[in-house]
Image (cartoon, rainbow, N blue to C red):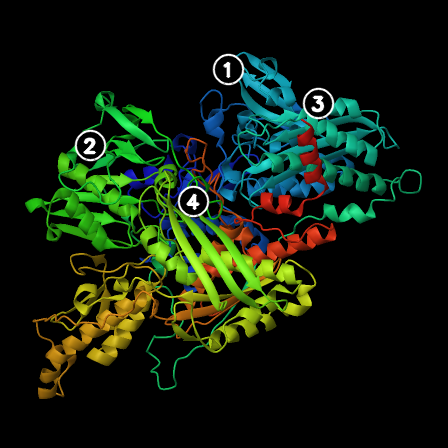
Amino acid sequence: MLKFFFFNAVHLSGTKYGCGVGGCGACTVMISTYDPVTKQIQHRPANSCLFPICSLHGAAVTTVEEVGSIKPRIHTIQERLAKCNGSQCGFCTPGKVMSIYALLRNHAEPSMEKIIAALDGRFQTEPTCCQLRATGQCCLDEEEHVCSSSTGGRVSYIKVFHFLLFALQNLDILMKAVPKLAEEKTKIYQAFLQHLRTLAGEQMRSMASLGGHIVSRASTRELNPISSVGKSVLNLASEDGKRQILLNDQFLAGCEHADLKAKEVIVSVLIPYSMKDDFISAFRQAESQKNALSIVNSGMRILFSPGTDTIVDLSILYGGIGSTILSARKSCEKLIGRQWNDQMLNEACRLVLEEIFLPPSALGRKVEYRRTLLVSFLFRFYLEVLHGLNQMVRTGQELHTHISEKMSALGMLQSGIAQGVQIYQLRCVCRQPPQDPVGRPIMHQSGIKHTTGEEVYIDDIRPVDGELSLALVTNIKAHTKIMSINASEALQVPGVVDVVTARDVPGENGKDEQAYAEDKVFLASGGVSGPFAKCGAEKVKIVYEDLEPILTIEVTICLLFNNRFRILELEYLLDHRREDKEMDVYVSTQHATDVQEFVASALNLQYNKIMCHMKCVGGAFGGKITKPLLFAVIAAVAANKTGHAVCFALERNMDMLITGRWHPFFGKYKVGFMNDGRIRAADFQCYINGGCTKDEFESVSPSLIPLIGQCIYILNLLVRGHACKTNLPSNTAFRGFEFPQAGLFVETCIVAVATQTDLPHEKVREINMYKRVNLTSFKEKFDAENLWKCWEECLDKPDYYSKKAMKGIAIIPMKFSVGFNATYFHQVTSSNQSLVHIYIDGSVLVTHGGIELGQGIHTKMSQLSYLIASRELKIPLSYIHLCETSTTTVTSGKYTAGSTGTEINARAVQDVCQILWKHLDPIQRDNPNGKWEDWVNLSLCFLLLNYDKPTSDTEKGHAFPYFRFGVSCSENIGTDIVMDACFTINPAIDIGQIEGAFIQGVGLYTLEEIFFSPEGEQLTLGPDTYKIPAICDIPEQFCGVGEARFFLGSSVFFAIQDAVAAARKERGLPMDFTPNSPLTVERICMACDDVFTEMVRLFSSLL
């Protein structure tokens, strides 16, 4: 594929590899081709990870390196994206640059709508033209040029030359052509345009073919049902000649007599005009608004007898129900001759539910929801047709006058342009020199390199001579015993050098979790063996004995929060043996010291023989602390056995299988409260799914208990936490360290109290919030003044009370505990967490233990280094340089996690500078008129500075250094966030952390789910099945004040719950319902409990 050609052949690393399925956009490049039809050069964004090189004959490819670089110049796009703080870890930033660059090449002055469309969701795959041609040949080899004279006068089609595209240019042509035709002729085209705006991402639409979309016949191909009901015709060609076939339900079902022959290709698709008495509609429901595979899709068409509402012809097709597109043909035949009225609708719903049967064990899950969508789509089509009939002038009056109360169901969700407002207070004191950068919104230090693709990640390191690649063999069942491993066939595969198993580990095979499985496999997808090439890995024969698995908390005693991390950069390691048994380990991790320890233990070496290096990390959020340890051991053992450098890079599906995720959480509560909403006592029982090994749950479980209180003061509180062992992959600590789970649990309890007392939710929260100086449940004193300031300001900002009547709004407070309650994570010394070199020319090299994960720690450390160096060493910022983090310079470093990285490392650097100045101070006093360079000597002394360790006991104490407070208020289209930011070192970077954390929270609470088979095999393997927020999911009105945290995204969860409650109240349903997280479109629909969900349940009970 094109992406690997860039890296291996022409040595370009700016184009990143994120998923391998065209779902993330990190690998975006621009393809330029000459179109002989329009006689213009067309520029299109494309996913290079899927683009075959053979399809590029006659095309030009532009990568981010060509757009601009630090030398000699950067492009305006890159400059503005960097200076406007448009990147964090920067791994996906080159793809964004290329998307906008391709847009500007086609539209010099694009509208905001076009810019948003160019950056729309990036998570779904569509095949390219060349990938699905029956001949296997490139579509550029086609000889026939189809023109308008090859079709009849009644037929319209999309013009073809080489590619049949969904490109933006073609959509523009279609959109311009439709208004020029009579409206009655363009109903099919309107339906096409409706789907094309949300189908896949811009990179896919620009390069995929309609022919490939059609012949794949996958159930989720949304254009197929609408093409079929529109009576489309496929023009085919082969060596034997040309012919036409109907694109009907039989073709979509794969019937042999209606299918393509072996050597036929689709030349063009003929799409007839619609007729005057035609009504055609297309429907889809997906997890996300754009760029997501549909859960259910449908195409419907009806033809009436002229001047009446009597049905002459009816076609209904559904996708997403079975393995192919399904037709409700029998139901349609029974409805012909009926009038289009409510009686017909009821009969149609019954017939469709009978004919389109979905068994409870059907693939794809969500059975009841999908059956509800069958009749929901039919109801919407019914209303659209009624509305259309009333718009048609027939007898001088409307045919149907009783449907006005139902017309609200026809409203389309129109996304506006997202607008963000960030307000922060610059606390730079008047006496602060202008050149002092601390507290100022300075651009991310690597921002320019992010946009040019010049930032070097582990994956960008050039291969060394003799480097080997490593591939894993994994188990798909949750609990098995290994009986035998036979790799003889794998060793016969050309290029396979060796096989590595647990027997090859010289020392300790991991600690709590084995790096190489020895006898039992305790989790689905556990690693079994090492460096095979991918083909060789497939040849390994492993015999298992199946054991009984434990998959859920309910079995041991989690329905909630089965989500994983949104980390675009895949796990990537490079282990390289050197002389004297030394080994260099290049790894993407948050804790280099642990990697050093695990590798040394596995190889039976001293720590001083293992040099662990960290380049920039492409996102982590807690997901790169524990798992990289095992991957480093796997690669190190392979390098030790073979004597070669070993590269270990996980593919996206393997990364999804192996790496951990949030701890699934299950909670039970008992609450005693007064009529005024005051909570007097609470009993909380919390269970987390720890997975198959300890991993992080020994740290998470103790943290969960003090976090459970949130902002609510409960005088009599009993909290019990349990970590449950299962046979699923181990879970780890994500952003918030179980606070998002605990916070949602407590806030759900508050909602239940408000429902029972019939009080507004915000009043119950307000009456129970901490007041002034308080003691937490673990007897730590804190002042709640800033919490109340945030609360009151957030109430004022969105005019909360006037909007409350609209429903779908919630305001959520937050008390976030900074750092770890395991106090040894805060214990650092200047000698093991930082290193400062003063060179003979006076320049200063600063190394610290913090790792750049995209949170801007290097930028903040540069700002603080100026402050420290200028005040402690009396030198300007230009003398200071920061280099990579490595165990060769920083020993026994701490995790870069828990929002403590900047504070811990800055203090360590300050202490080192003070020590150095003590040694230079006598020289300076002896020569007060000298220069800095005159005072510098070559002897650097490092002294151990002992910090006072925080003290605590089992009953009380300072479990956390301090708290940060915040409040977010969300309604249907907007969110306001107010946060106590203390003294922010860099507001620009912190605001990016605000908005990024909030949107992650929105994904956690409303979108992201992971599913397993009954045998424990993980079914959610990539961006086509695991949806995270895209640009279309950002609030249209986004106002942030200060530094917000991940949990504040829960305000969207409770705003949706408020809207659902309003719908249930309108129908007279009970209000004491408890929605689970994530609150997906399925759960929202089923919680509303409307007439269609009742219809499905009633019909199911009769089967």
Coordinates of residue 383 in the picture (x, y in percent): 77, 40
Identified at 50% across, 41% down, the residue is 41
Which tag, 3 or 2, sits closer to the chain's start? 3
Q: How far separated are the C-alphas under marks 3 and 2? A: 57 Å
Amino acid type shown at disc 4: Thr
Instruction: Give x and y (percent) for residue 455.
Output: 31, 54
Q: Position of residue 254 (x, y in %)?
A: 57, 19
Disc 4 crowd rating (10 Å Cα; few below 14, some 14-19, many 20+) is many
C-alpha separation, residue under disc 1 versus residue under disc 2: 43 Å
Residue 703 placement: quadrant: bottom left
Is the residue marked by circle 3 packed among few (<14), some (14-19), or many (20+) residues within 10 Å? some
Q: Is residue 918 visible?
A: yes
Q: CA distance from mark 2 to mark 4?
A: 36 Å
Marks 2 and 4, the one that precedes in the sequence = 4
Residue labelled with disc 4: 28
Mark 1–mark 4 Cα distance, whole angstroms, equals: 33 Å
| Residue 1039 visible to an observer of this rendering | no
Quadrant where the image shows the C terminus: top right
Q: Amino acid at mark 1?
A: Ala
Q: What amino acid is at disc 2?
A: Val
Amino acid bearing label 3: Arg
Which quadrant of the figure contains the N terminus? top left
The residue that mark 3 highlights is 329
The residue at which mark 1 appears reads as 262
Report the mark closest to the observer, 1 or 2: 2
Mark nearer the viewer, 3 or 4:
3
